[in-house]
Image: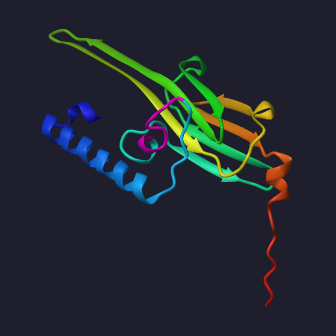
């Protein structure tokens, strides 16, 4: 969608994103990923990849991502440190021929979505399911992460 914006608007949005990164760097503690310099902020700001839902239960962390129109070979799922990383590439092409016209459209674009995990997970026991454009990743918590949970009772 960004390709439809006028160049000055894209440049202004890019500067705004950079300004927001600087502010976040100054005011929020930053956890770095080993391989990617701008690891966490792109997924928070403009154009950060697929939409996700994250749910934490007593025993696991569940991440559901929308990846419509992709095959399972078009993306990868990785657990790196305390992050879940979704990488992939969207490829779309449409072609239509009529009596007096020819219409062709192609769009390509890579994405990376980095999801900070709320606790330690056991990556070796993680599972992922992909069906109808929805990816569901289940990450079991480590025993240490389960032990840290404290239940609070409220007296009435």
Residue depicted at x 49% and y 32%: 36
Residue depicted at x 51% and y 49%: 30
Residue reaching furthest to the bottom: 156
- Asked if the magenta segment contains residue 36, the reply would be yes
Nearest to the observer: residue 107 or residue 42: 42
The image shows residue 32 at horizontal and vertical percentages of 54, 41
Quadrant housing residue 140: top right
The image shows residue 118 at horizontal and vertical percentages of 66, 52
Q: Is residue 81 left or right of residue 23?
A: right
Quadrant housing residue 106: top left
Residue depicted at x 66% and y 33%: 79
Q: Answer above or below: position of 23 versus 42.
A: below
Nearest to the observer: residue 63 or residue 34: 34
Q: Is residue 34 left or right of residue 10?
A: right
Q: Answer above or below: position of 106 versus 115.
A: above
Q: What colour scheme has been applied to the protein in the rendered image?
A: rainbow
Residue depicted at x 65% and y 29%: 130
- Asked if the magenta segment contains residue 58, the reply would be no
Quarter of the image containing the N terminus? top left
- Count how many numbered circles sit on residues in the image: 0
The image shows residue 63 at horizontal and vertical percentages of 64, 43
The image shows residue 113 at horizontal and vertical percentages of 50, 36
Q: Answer above or below: position of 52 versus 95.
A: below
Nearest to the observer: residue 151 or residue 27: 27
Q: Is residue 113 left or right of residue 139?
A: left
Q: Main secondary structure of the magenta part?
A: loop
Q: Is residue 125 left or right of residue 92?
A: right
Bounds of the magenta span? 35-42
Quadrant housing residue 98: top left
Quarter of the image containing the C terminus? bottom right
Nearest to the observer: residue 4 or residue 103: 4
């Amino acid at each position: 969608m960004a390709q439809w914006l006028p160049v000055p608007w894209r440049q202004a949005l890019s500067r705004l994103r950079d300004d927001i990164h600087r502010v976040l760097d100054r005011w929020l503690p930053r956890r770095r990923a080993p391989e990617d310099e701008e690891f966490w902020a792109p997924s928070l700001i403009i154009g950060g990849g697929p939409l996700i839902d994250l749910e934490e239960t007593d025993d696991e962390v569940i991440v559901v991502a929308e990846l419509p129109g992709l095959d399972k070979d078009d993306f990868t799922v990785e657990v790196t440190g305390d992050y879940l990383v979704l990488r992939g590439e969207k490829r779309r092409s449409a072609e239509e021929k009529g009596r007096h016209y020819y219409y062709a459209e192609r769009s390509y674009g890579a994405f990376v979505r980095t999801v900070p995990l709320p606790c330690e997970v056991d990556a070796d026991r993680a599972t992922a399911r992909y069906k109808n454009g929805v990816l569901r990743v289940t990450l079991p918590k480590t025993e240490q992460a389960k032990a840290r949970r404290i239940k609070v009772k409220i007296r009435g």
